[in-house]
Amino acid sequence: MMIPVKTSIVLIFLLLSVVVYASPPLEISREKVKLQFFIDEQGRPVYAVLFNGRDVVKPSALGFMLETDSLFYKNFSLVNVDRKVVDETWKPVWGECSTIRNNYEQLTVHLKHGSGKLLDIVFRVFADGVGFRYEFPRQTGLVYFVVKEECTQFHLAGNHKAFWIPGDFDTNEYAYTTSLLSEVNNAPVVQAATDIAVRTVTDSLAVQTPLMMKTADGLYINIHEAALLNYPAMQLHVDKKEFILTSTLVPDACNNKAYLHAPAHTPWRTLLVSDKAADILASKTILNLNDPPASPNLSWIKPMKFVGVWWEMQTGKSTWNYSDYADSTNANGQLIPNGRHGANTANVKRYIDFAAKNKIGGVLVEGWDRGWEDWFGNWKENVFDFVTPYPDFDVKEITEYARSKGVTMIMHHETSGSATNYERQLDTAFRFMQQFGYPAVKTGYVGRIVPRGEHHDGQWMVNHYERVLQQGMRYHVMVDAHEPPRPTGLQRTYPNFMACEAARGNEYHAFSNGNPPDHETVLPFTRLMGGPMDYTPGIFKLKGYVPGMPDRSVHSTLTKQLALYVTLFSPVEMAADLPENYEAKPDAFQFIKDVPVDWDTTRILEAEPGDYITIARKGKGTNNWFVGAITDEHARTTTLLLNFLEKGKKYKATLYEDGVGANWKTDPEAYSIRTLLVDSNTKLKLSLAAGGGTAISLMQIEQ
C-alpha cells in the first residue's frame, strides 16, 4: 500500500530517535496528567503527555502545511508564554448531570515562524486529559489562507488495542473493529460494508475519531476533537510500526482542507487518559472545551421521548413514498397511490393516540412530504421542498388532533444530501414548522453531497450543519441530525442540538446484517464521547419483524433494549418499535414510560470497552434513579452496590431482567420482572444473558 505523499513527508521529519531542545521544556499539570512543550533544534513545536509518570504521548510534533508555506511546521521560535488556571462550574440546559465543573491549567505559547508569520498554540490540562488547539492571531503576514494539511501528531507509547472504524469522508456507520494498532487495515472493512449508501475512503490506514484504546499495562486512552466549527473533521493515519497517529483532514472538491481568515483557530484536539475505563465515560472535558451558548433565552428547549412512523418503514410494512414511481400518474397528472404509504392521516393518528395514552411527548412522521419516489441515488439537487405534503397527509387535521391529545409533532427533513437545496428553503421550512407547531426536526443527509464534490465531514458541510443550528436557535427549533460528522460537544454552544446519528444505529437490524452484540458496549467510548446519539432503542419484536425474512433478528435481548435508554444517553429518545409490539408486553414497556431523558446525576458503576457497561442516573428534578447494565456476546454476572442512593431512604426497585434461557441468538424476548424494597446498603446480583442486559427503576418511597 502506498503511503500518501504528505504522510510520508510528515513521518520523515517526525521520526526522532533523539530529542534536542532549542528551548527549555515547559510543563503544566493537573493531578496525574502532565503536559510538556518545547521547540526542538529544527524549530518544530513538540508536546508530550504523561499520566502518573508514564508516557501516554511521546514527544510529538505540531504544525501545518499551508498553500503558501508547505513548511509551516518548523523554523519556529518561542516569543512569549501565558499561563492561567480556571476553576468554575456551569449548568447545562440538559444533560447527564445538572452541574459541570470546568477546572484546568492553561498554557499558551506564542510562536513566530522564520517567515515572520505568527502562530499560537493553546494547551489546557484537566485531571482526565488534555485539549489543545492552534490559533492564528490577527497579523499582516497571514490574512486569508488555505490549509493543505494539519500535521498534528500523537506518538503513542506502544501497540495498543484499539476500537476503530475506517476514516471515511462521508459516513461513520461502520461496525467497530477491535485490533492492535499494528493490525489496522480498513480496506476489507470498507469493501464489505455494502449496506452503507455512500463510502469514501482514500487511505487504508486511516481511522475515525473518537478513537478508543487500551494499553497492555491498563491505561485507557481516547483521542477526539472538540468544538468542530469552520474546519473539516479530523481523522488519524496510523503508522503501524512506530505507533504514530497523524491528523488527516477531510478534503473539499479542490482537495484543500480549510479556508481561514485570521484571526482564526482550529477545533480542540482532545486526549483523555485514565487507569479506569469509567473515568473516560464520566469525562466532561470535551464539553468544557466548547463555548457557552450566546442566547440567554433557552427555556423553549425541552427534552422528550417520542414514537414514530419509522420502524414500520424500515421493516417494509409501509413505505416512505406515496406512489411506486415518480411518473406513476393518472390522466390528471396526479400520483397514483401504492396503498402502502405509512405517513397517512389515519395511521399518524394511531401513533398520536398511542403516545397520548402512554404519556409520550412526541410523534415523528417521515415520508409526509412529496419527493420520495425519486429521492436517492441520482445526485439530484432539487428533491424536496419541505412544505408540500402528500395528498393523504392532512397537516392541519393532524396538528389539531395532536394538540387536542397533548402530543407534540416532530418534523422530518430528508435532504438526500442536497444541502444547497435545503439552505435555500430553510427559512421557509422553519416558518412552516412554526405555523403548525413543530418544535423539533430530524434532518437527514442520505446520499452524495450537493455541492457536488463536497463530503459530509468537510469544512463546507460542517458550516452547513452550524447554519441549520443557528437558524434553529432563531426559530426555536430543536435539531436531531442524521448523517452528520460525529459530534464534538457543540450541544453546549447550541443547546438546540439535541442529538444526532453519526454512527451505526439500531436501524441496521432492519435492512442489513445488524450490529454485533458488543456494539453498544463500544459506542459510549467512541461515538458518544462527543454527544448524544439517536440510536432508536426499544425494539421488542426481535425476530421475524421483516416480512419474508424470518431469520432477520436484532442482536440483543429485550431487556438490553431497555437498558440502552440509560447507557446510550440522549435527551430525545425514541420508543422505536411498533405500538402493537409494545401493547403485547405492557409490563416491559413500563420501563420506557418511566425512564427520564434528562438527568441530575450520572454514576458510571463499571465499564470495559467492548465487554460491559453499567450506569446509574438520577432523573432531573426527582429522587428516582435508573440503572442500565449491558454486556457483549458473553453472559455475565455482576454485583450492583446501591450505595449511590440517598442514605436513610427506601426505594421500590423494579428489575427488568433476562429470563431463563434468554440469549440474543436463540431466545431474545425472554424476560422477567421482579420488585423489592432496597436502600443504599443493598447489594443486587445481576445475571445478564449473552447479548443481554438489565434495566432497573429505583423509585424513592415517601416517608
Image: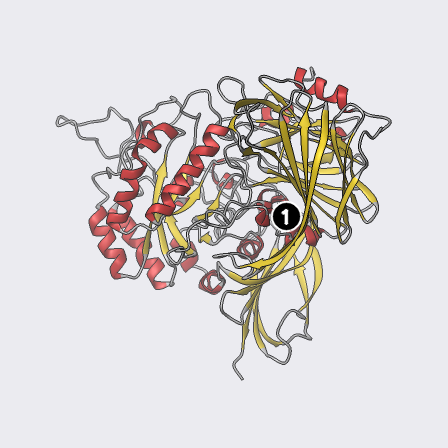
Instruction: Please tell me which residue is depicted at 63% across the width and 28% down the height of the picture.
Output: 118
Element carrying mark 1:
helix
Task: Say whether residue 585 is left or right of residue 177.
Answer: left
Instruction: Say which quarter of the image contains residue 600.
Output: bottom right
| Horizontal and vertical percent position of residue 405 | 28, 61
Q: Can residue 355 be seen in this view?
A: yes
Instruction: Please tell me which residue is depicted at 50% across the width and 33% down the height of the picture.
Output: 230
Q: Quadrant of the C terminus?
A: bottom right
The residue most toward the bottom is 703
Camera-side residue: 248 or 537? 248
Q: Quadrant of the N terminus?
A: top right
Camera-side residue: 442 or 134? 134
Instruction: Please tell me which residue is depicted at 76% across the width and 19% down the height of the picture.
Output: 12
Q: Can residue 340 be seen in this view?
A: no
| Horizontal and vertical percent position of residue 697 | 55, 67
User: Badge 1: how crowded within 10 Å, few (<14), some, or many (20+)?
Assistant: many
Instruction: Say which quarter of the image contains residue 58.
Output: top right
The answer to whether 236 is drawn above or below residue 161 in the figure is: above
| Horizontal and vertical percent position of residue 614 | 64, 57
Instruction: Say which quarter of the image contains residue 101.
Output: bottom right
The residue most toward the left is 332
The three-letter code of the residue at mark 1 reads: Thr
The residue tagged 1 is 521
| Horizontal and vertical percent position of residue 577 | 43, 50
Task: Say whether residue 115 is left or right of residue 503.
Answer: right
Camera-side residue: 459 or 639? 459
